[in-house]
Image: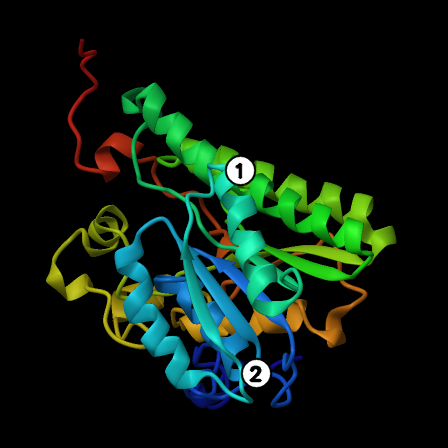
Amino acid sequence: MTDSTGPARATAPRGLPAPPPPGTTALPPGTYRGSLVLVTGGGTGLGKAVAAEFARLGADVMIVSRRAAHLEPALEELASVSRDGGTVTAAVCDIRDPDRIAEVFDAAEAAHGRAPDVLVNNAAANFPVPAEDMSPNAWRTVVDITLNGTFYMTREFGRRHLVAGTPGSVIAVGASYAWTGGPGFAHSAAAKAGVKNLVETLAVEWGPYGIQVNGLVPGLMPHEDMTGDIRANLERGGPERGLGGDLGGNAEHDARQPALRVGAPRELGWAATFLASPYARFISGHTLVVDGANWQRRGLMSPPVVTVREQMGRGPFREGP
């Protein structure tokens, strides 16, 4: 029998503890010394945070982005955290273009004498829109980058390791609405569901050849490179709901997480370095969700339904030309 009159401090919600400080590594120093890690979308946001954690562990890191303007500042930042003689290089690459992808892999092999040992498929496209307002081009663009581009990158990586007879590790950054559906994000949710299935399929196909394939799903991890559309959605309701600093620094966002805090981008980086490491060799075909259990959250009673249009502040649908 429990005593409901016990001290309040025993049951007061406190949330999950804060992570170790920036610069801390999740694995022994030098874990990735001599390894080449390629990160798509590595010039900004969560991709850059993932690349930084591999660099801290001694990896040679190559970041790719569609926009050259994203690469130069990222190179300086990543070079400042690189350890154990690791190098940081960059290449412009639209992952919708298989020929350009092959050129990037060729350049990596020419510079390092081997294909990348680890591929992190982080690049994606996304913006909120009601499905009825979505243009065919918007659908094609998001699916082409998020799903097709991920496949093209992974295919090139796998083929080179199959020919060389070498092991490798693929990590595909996904989204929890691959399981649940994503109202307001039909294009991205459908594409991410495809990515999740691709992880599970290729893990079985390529496991016999020593190639791991895993997924990694971030929760809310505010960062300075969030798109304007996503930032506007998070800030809807007034400036007091802004994104805050390292861990959000925002009671509104923190209170919406079972952890009672948002995530730090480095927490995704730590998870990525573990999944591709020698310590996770028997993990394949798995998608790890790093969101403090937020995607599994359910209320005792369902809240009132608010349509996507209302949530986005849009009026009634009117079919246009």
Residue at the outermost top position: 321
Structure colour scheme: rainbow
Numbered mark located on residue 16 in the image: none
In percent of width and height, residue 174 lies at: 53, 50
Q: Amino acid at mark 2?
A: Gly
Q: Residues within 10 Å of mark 2 (few under 14, many from 20)?
A: many
Q: Circle 2 — which element?
A: loop
The x and y percentages for residue 173 are 53, 54
Q: Is residue 6 above or below residue 36?
A: below
**Of labels 1 and 2, the one closer to you:** 1
Residue 285 horizontal side relative to residue 316, left or right:
right
The answer to which quarter of the image holds residue 170 is: bottom right
Judge whether 100 appears above or below 50 on screen: above
Which amino acid does the dot numbered 1 rest on? Pro
Q: Residues within 10 Å of mark 1 (few under 14, many from 20)?
A: some
Specify whether 162 is left or right of 19: right
Please give the residue where the numbered disc 2 appears in the rendered image: 58
Residue 293 position, x and y percent, is 53, 62
Residue at the spot 39% in from the left edge and 36% down from the top edge: 185
Tag 1 secondary structure: helix
Viewer-proximal residue, 255 or 292? 292
Q: Nearer the viewer, residue 155 or 217?
A: 155
Task: Report which residue position mark 1 lands on.
Answer: 98
Distance of label 1 from label 2 (alpha carbons): 29 Å
List the single residue furthest toward the front: 110
Q: Earlier in the sequence, mark 1 or mark 2?
A: 2
Q: Residue at x 40, y 76 (%)?
A: 78
Q: Quadrant of the N terminus?
A: bottom right
Residue 18 x %, y %: 44, 83
